[in-house]
Image (tube, rainbow, N blue to C red):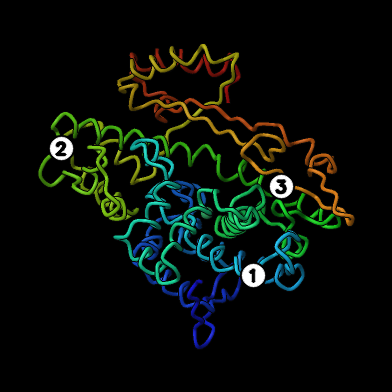
Amino acid sequence: MDNIIYLPREKVFRDPIHNYIHIEHKVILDLINTKEFQRLRRIKQLGTSSFTFHGAEHTRFTHSIGVYEITRQICDNFKRNYPSHSKEDGLWNDEERIVALCAALLHDVGHGPYSHTFEHIFDTDHEQWTQEIITNEKTEINAVLRKVASNFPERVASVIKKTYPNPQVVQIISSQLDADRMDYLLRDAYNTGTNYGMFDLTRVLRVMRPYKEGIAFETDGMHAVEDYILARFQMYQQIYFHPVSRGMEVILTNLLQRAKTLYENGDMEGFDMPSLLVPFFEKNVSVNDYLRLDDGVLNTYFNLWIDHPDKILKDLTRRFLNRHPFKSIQFTDSTKYLIPNMKDLVEKCGFDKQYYTAINNSSDLPYDAYNEPKTPIEIIQEDGTLNELSTLSYLVASISDKISKDERLFFPKQMLTKTRNSIFDSYYDEFQSHINNNQLI
Ligand code: ZN
């Protein structure tokens, strides 16, 4: 039996998206106060997107609390309107609330600084780290969860891993219309100062309901769900895949790659030695090593490397700190053949092509009806019949299998400017002719 303690008085946190965030369980407040959760205050939610949308300084901390709040509202709605009376009726058993709330709050606790870039270079996986931080007995989070029940950390981790036996709980936290996505779309739209991510959260929550195999949405809420799918589609197009943010992301990737290579060659020493990154260079990372990192740690090393004797590291760091993104052109299968030559031209102009060019893809399905392991969005009729969303919505059907793919070659801005240096300019002309003749944009 779980040991669930209520706070003597409800606690509230003020939030720009959800107004008050309500906390009634001691375990939730204790989790927020752990050092591992507080670390999320020091990791920006959108990484390099803030170089394009300067308002996007919000952190994984605020997002995680928001996902908790949406989950709490879902549980409240289910408890009021769909309470289970027997094991087999497929309705909501409110004893699941506490595991759902803890998983919601902790779902991103394993994110590192500049997540995706960092994961790419150091081959780490934030979902696995989330599970490790929850189940490792050395963490404060684990100690707080164990007070609920000895196997409670494993239960919370299994929701993240999607092996938890009740699919309703798993789908609230992770599916194509889950508390995580609902919070980040609204929060990222708000903080970037754009309107694309807006949708009617109150309405979506109202039409959400549990059934035996998971979560479904009532027929008369279909338009609210459509609106959410479009909001998501547009946020990816306009914000998450923005070429300038990606131009900063590739600089960050190449700069970390350069630092790693210098370390491996024994060229990092003294003041420049990034001791907190050494476990990552050595591929021998403990949970404690992992938790030492945040955006501030990386930015501090970057500030030191701006004086590094290695010209490439020094220059890439300068470009990153002072926001000088690489420029880019989009290419397709039919223009792909130009890329090796364009990279060579960058090199001929004096830039090491390994560090001064990059290919970066963005692809995302706005809504995926069929591919496993994604859970389709089900619309439930009054008689209980389920229909997958795109079979009912023309709007969703028209975008559901369209991969919005944007493949780009990144290179220094200097490649687009004439210098009156004759050697450089002859390569410049050739580079430019590739762009113009092929209408690369
Ligand atoms: Zn999240």
Which one is earlier in the sequence, the residue at label 3 or at label 2?
Answer: 3
From the image, tell me which residue sits under label 2.
268
Secondary structure beneath disc 1?
Answer: helix
Say whether marks 3 and 2 touch (CB < 8 Å). no
Q: Secondary structure at mark 3?
A: helix
Camera-side residue of 373 and 117 = 373
In the image, is residue 238 above or below residue 152? above
Q: Residue under label 3, please give it.
A: 229
Q: Position of residue 130 (x, y in %)?
A: 42, 52
Residue drawn at the location 37% of the way across and 60% of the way down = 42
x and y percentages locating residue 299 in the rendered image: 30, 50
Whole-percent x and y of residue 301?
Answer: 24, 48
Q: Secondary structure at mark 2?
A: loop
- Residue linked to disc 1: 94
- In which quadrant is the C terminus drawn? top right
Q: Residue at x 42, y 27 (%)?
A: 358
Question: Viewed as shown, does residue 105 lie left or right of 356?
Answer: right
Instruction: Point out the residue furthest to the right here.
Output: 383
- Depth check, mark 2 against mark 1: the one in front is 1
- Of labels 3 and 2, the one closer to you: 3
